[in-house]
Image: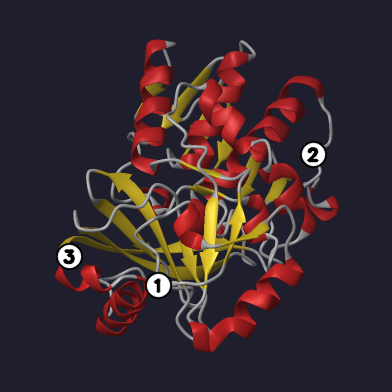
């Protein structure tokens, strides 16, 4: 029997992989909700865009994420990602193009007719997105149907996926604060995530359907959870207005903030400390990298295969 500490995206994906391999699992936590970092995620499965700043393993492992989520019954929109910049920041778009692959230059209104104010953009056609809360609920439902108990007392071997709360055992884990908004704006129709580049206020906006959009997300070196700051709200709404003026009339449905767990190089880690396996440090890549990390943990548990992300010093 294995008990997983934590029921966010990391814990649920590991539980899914272990259950599929016939390993008895229980989860010492409630199904993911507003207390989980992954509750506030964007859900962009965009490995090539992330390559602008992320390390090579993020690009390589992230390419299999969309297929994994689809295999679990999670709706995945394979509509690509559109990257834009205001005319005055055209150099930012050129820089982004140089640092990434698997994109092509387009006139944005070819794929998003409402964005006819932008003369040029980059289209990452192979990328996808999902709705994180639907994905978390789907995994939880699948696991419950398979007999996995939530809120269980720890029993047997432990796998710790508590995110930032695991700093009591992982002292090099740090918090990276992210703030987001959810708005409703039926006057704008977008069918894929749009990234608006800006040297100071980068924005992504992800469609959730029915005129609802998630705007995100700040990246602040802080472990403060707390409410969203006025500055973040102003900057994200200003950037959304720059994307399309109709966003000025949007209804603000939700504000949210959380601290993402990250290691110094922003790559995940799998560590064995005593009899406990720790899987942590997904940084901004929760839904993109969790399936790959989960497969590595499941391989390690069932076959002893050493994971790529395992630290040598903690075995």
List the residue tagged with mark 3: 250
Q: Are marks 2 and 3 in contact (CB under 8 Å)?
A: no
Q: Earlier in the sequence, mark 2 or mark 1?
A: 1
For the question of whether residue 144 can be seen, the reply is: yes
User: Residue 14: x percent and y percent?
Assistant: 57, 31
List the residue tagged with mark 2: 307
List the residue tagged with mark 1: 117
Q: Pick the residue in front: 58 or 115.
A: 115
For image coordinates 42% across by 29% down, the residue present is 75
* Closer to the eye: label 2 or 1: 1
Quadrant position of the N terminus in the picture: top right
Q: Is 158 drawn above or below residue 110 in the view shown?
A: above
* Closer to the eye: label 2 or 3: 3
Disc 3 is placed on an element classified as: loop
Q: Pick the residue in front: 264 or 132.
A: 132
Q: Earlier in the sequence, mark 3 or mark 1?
A: 1
Q: Are marks 3 and 1 in contact (CB under 8 Å)?
A: no
For image coordinates 33% across by 57% down, the residue present is 214
Q: Is 138 drawn above or below residue 19 in the view shown?
A: below
Q: Earlier in the sequence, mark 2 or mark 3?
A: 3
Quadrant position of the C terminus in the picture: top right
Disc 2 is placed on an element classified as: loop
């Amino acid at each position: 029997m294995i008990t997983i500490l934590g029921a966010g995206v990391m814990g649920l994906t590991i539980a899914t992989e272990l259950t599929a391999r016939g390993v008895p699992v229980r989860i010492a936590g409630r199904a993911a909700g507003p207390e989980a970092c992954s509750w506030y995620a964007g859900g962009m499965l965009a490995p090539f865009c992330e390559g602008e700043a992320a390390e090579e393993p993020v690009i390589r492992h992230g390419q299999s994420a969309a297929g994994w989520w689809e295999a679990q019954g999670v709706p995945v929109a394979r509509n690509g990602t559109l990257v834009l910049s205001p005319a005055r920041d055209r150099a930012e778009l050129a820089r982004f193009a140089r640092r990434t692959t698997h994109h092509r230059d387009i006139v944005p209104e070819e794929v998003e007719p409402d964005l006819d104010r932008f003369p040029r953009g980059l289209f990452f056609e192979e990328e996808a997105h999902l709705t994180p809360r639907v994905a978390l609920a789907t995994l939880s439902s699948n696991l419950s149907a398979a007999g996995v108990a939530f809120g269980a007392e720890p029993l047997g071997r432990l796998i710790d996926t508590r995110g930032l709360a695991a700093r009591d055992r992982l002292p090099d884990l740090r918090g990276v604060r992210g703030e987001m908004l959810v708005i409703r704006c039926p006057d704008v129709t977008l069918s894929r995530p749009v990234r608006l580049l800006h040297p100071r206020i980068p924005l992504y906006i992800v469609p959730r359907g029915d005129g609802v959009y998630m705007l995100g997300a700040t990246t602040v070196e802080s472990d403060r959870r707390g409410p969203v700051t006025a500055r973040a709200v102003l900057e994200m709404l200003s950037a959304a207005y720059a994307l399309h003026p109709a966003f000025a009339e949007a209804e603000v449905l939700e504000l949210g903030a959380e601290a993402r767990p990250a290691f110094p190089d922003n790559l995940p880690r799998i560590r064995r400390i005593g009899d406990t396996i720790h899987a942590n440090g997904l940084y901004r890549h929760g839904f993109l990298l969790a399936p790959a990390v989960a497969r590595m943990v499941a391989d390690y548990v069932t076959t002893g295969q050493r994971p790529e992300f395992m630290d040598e010093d903690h075995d």
